[in-house]
Amino acid sequence: MKRIPYSRQTIEKDDITAVVDTLKQDFLTNGPVTLEFEKKIAQKLGAKFCVLCSSATAALTLSYRVMGIKNGSRVLVPSVTFCSTSNAAELLGAKVEHIDCNSKNGLLDFSYLEKILQKKKFDYIVPVHLGGQTVDMKKIKKYSQLFNLRVIEDASHALGTSHITNKERFVGDCKYSEMCIFSFHPVKNITMGEGGAVTTNNEEHYHNLLKYRNHGIERNESNFFYKKNSMTHNLKNLWYYEVQSIGFNFRISEINCALGLSQFKKLLNFKKKKQRIRNYYLKKLKELDFMSLVEQRDKNESPCWHLFQILIDFRSKSFSKADLMNYLKNNRIETQVHYIPLHLQPFYKKKYGLKKLPNAEKFYEDVLSIPFFASLETDEIDYIIDNLKKF
């Protein structure tokens, strides 16, 4: 059996053709493919606006900047997430407080959230959707209104996840938040090589996202501070622009967007494939009694699964997580852990001191991500299960 990674991109002939075709066009950045991809995302997810960036970390930093996160801002972030959710706020000068999580699925723990909101004042909250599942955003909205919090969703894992109520609504419609972030890293539900997106329904946010994505440069003459400098003898000075504030270079190339647009057309097909793979896993895992599955929070949710996570109470076993991961690796099966809780990381321990978040720590101790991606074959799953049995 060849090596089985814990995840990988699915690149097909039409993806390659889309990239090659873009290389033959006039624009390699800030061109028509970027605009088309942004419109397709907004339209599909039900948001008014979408802005593409060079990575999800860039999208987080950009959205935090536009939302006013700055020196002294107090931001709530779940401890079980990739470091960029916190790091982007810290880089802007914010103080991050990490929230405990549900030990069965890694999602934000509302009982912990309520207790901490009763004790301290915060300005922002960034709920993180993990593995394809989402935080209960109706509850987040309620708490945001009660405690005057502004909400930014980190949906890096949840592109394509939807909720079935009267009609299907997708994560990213910003019904309960001001902005929502997505990732197009190679292991995510679709890829553009590297890339990220921000969706919003706020037109002012949209304008500022575009401006701060490009160094803080303003090119719209109606927004100029010095309009007289934009004209000479009633003719436009076509070269004129204004740097009105400090921004970033977070633009994304047409090459990346061509790949992303091609992949986006197949998102729901990838979702169906991954659900079939998940169902096959579920059937086979019944043969193993030393593990359980990550709990599904909402039965009315249709996750576009990003990860397949199992839980093992290693503390009660005669073997460790390292034993299992190394055994599988020696048999060409790659696994991963999502994630080391951020409050345990050296930077945050040094800055804020050691704190206990027992549920996040239990989830971290128990969780393991096993191979899961749209092109995973049933014989590869059989091989993985057989090796788990042998172990």
Image: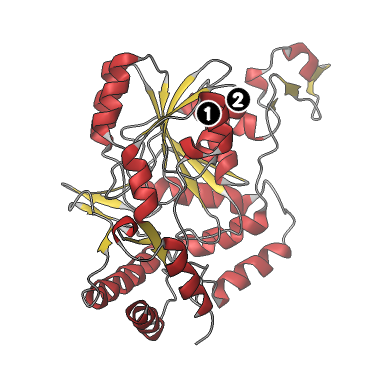
Q: Position of residue 19 (x, y in %)?
A: 64, 66
Q: Above or below — where is 187 with respect to 374?
A: above
Q: Name the residue nearer the viewer: 196 or 100.
A: 100
Establish if 25 lies above or below 289: above
Characterize the local packing of mark 1: few (<14), some (14-19) or many (20 or more) Cα atoms within 10 angstroms. Answer: many
Residue with the mark numbered 1? 64
Which quadrant would residue 112 be assigned to in this image? top left
Q: Which residue lies at the image location 55% right of the left edge and 47% below the top edge?
A: 196
Residue hosting label 2 = 92
The answer to the question of whether label 2 and label 1 lie on touching residues, with beta carbons closer than 8 A, is yes
Query: How many numbered marks have been drawn onto this rendered protein structure?
Result: 2
Question: Dot 1 lies on which element?
Answer: helix
**Badge 2 density bin: few <14, some 14–19, many ≥20, Cα 10 Å:** some
Residue 388 rendering spot, x and y as whole percentages: 36, 76
Labels 2 and 1: the sequence-earlier one? 1
- Residue 197 drawn at (x, y percent): 52, 44
Quadrant hosting residue 222:
top right
Three-letter code for the amino acid on which mark 1 is drawn: Tyr
- For the C terminus, the image quarter is bottom left
